[in-house]
Image: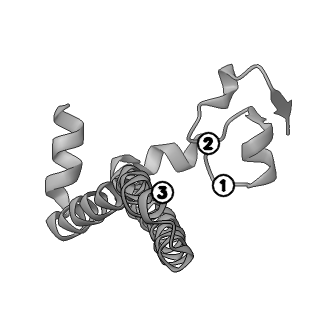
C-alpha cells in the first residue's frame, strides 16, 4: 500500500487524470442499466421505433466511449507504473545479465528482465 501511494504521489498530475478517467468510465458503465430502464419504460409501453433507434445509437456510443476511456486509463496506469519501475532499477541491474530468459522477454528483448525469469519455468538459455 505504501508503494502504491508513493507512486501516486510521485506524479500527481497523472494520478488526477487517472482518477478523472476512471470516474468517467464508471459513469459510462451505468449507461447499460439506464438503457434497459428506458427501453422498458418508453419503447415497450409506447412502441415507437424511433425511440428504440435513438436509445440504441446512444447506448452504442456509450459502450464505445467506455471502452476508449478504459484503454486510456490502462495506458496511463501502465505509464505511471513503468516510470516508477525505472526509478527503482539501479545500475547494478544492467551489469548483471540473466542466464536464462523466458519466452516473452526473449520475443521482446530488454537489457534486463523484469520477471526474474531465471526462476521461470518457460526459460530459454541464451
Residue 21 percent location from the top left of the image? 30, 65
Residue 30's tag is none
Residue 3 percent location from the top left of the image? 23, 37
Q: Is residue 74 above or below residue 33?
A: below
Q: CA distance from mark 3 to mark 2?
A: 58 Å
Residue 60 percent location from the top left of the image? 54, 69
Mark 3 vs 1: CB contact within 8 A: no
Q: Secondary structure at mark 2?
A: loop
Q: Secondary structure at mark 3?
A: helix
Front residue of 102 and 44: 44
- Mark 3 or mark 1, earlier in chain: 3
The extreme front residue here reads: 46
Q: Secondary structure at mark 1?
A: loop
Q: Residue at x 16, y 43 (%)?
A: 5
Q: Is residue 46 left or right of residue 34?
A: right
Residue 110's tag is 1
Mark 1 vs 2: CB contact within 8 A: yes
The quarter in which the C terminus is drawn is top right
Q: Residues within 10 Å of mark 2 (few under 14, many from 20)?
A: some
- Mark 3 or mark 2, earlier in chain: 3
Q: Is residue 89 left or right of residue 110?
A: left
Residue 44's tag is 3
Q: Residues within 10 Å of mark 3 (few under 14, many from 20)?
A: few
Residue marked by disc 2: 113
Question: Looking at the image, is mark 3 or mark 2 nearer the viewer?
Answer: 3
Amino acid at each position: 500500500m505504501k508503494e502504491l501511494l508513493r507512486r501516486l504521489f510521485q506524479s500527481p498530475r497523472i494520478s488526477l487524470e487517472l482518477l478523472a478517467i476512471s470516474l468517467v468510465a464508471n459513469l459510462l458503465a451505468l449507461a447499460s442499466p439506464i438503457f434497459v430502464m428506458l427501453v422498458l419504460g418508453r419503447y415497450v409501453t409506447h412502441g415507437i421505433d424511433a425511440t428504440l433507434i435513438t436509445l440504441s445509437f446512444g447506448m452504442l456510443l456509450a459502450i464505445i466511449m467506455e471502452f476508449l476511456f478504459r484503454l486510456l486509463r490502462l495506458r496511463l496506469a501502465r505509464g505511471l507504473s513503468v516510470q516508477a519501475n525505472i526509478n527503482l532499477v539501479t545500475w547494478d541491474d544492467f551489469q548483471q545479465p540473466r542466464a536464462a530468459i523466458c519466452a516473452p522477454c526473449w520475443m521482446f528483448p530488454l537489457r534486463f528482465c523484469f520477471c526474474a525469469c531465471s526462476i521461470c519455468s518457460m526459460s530459454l538459455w541464451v
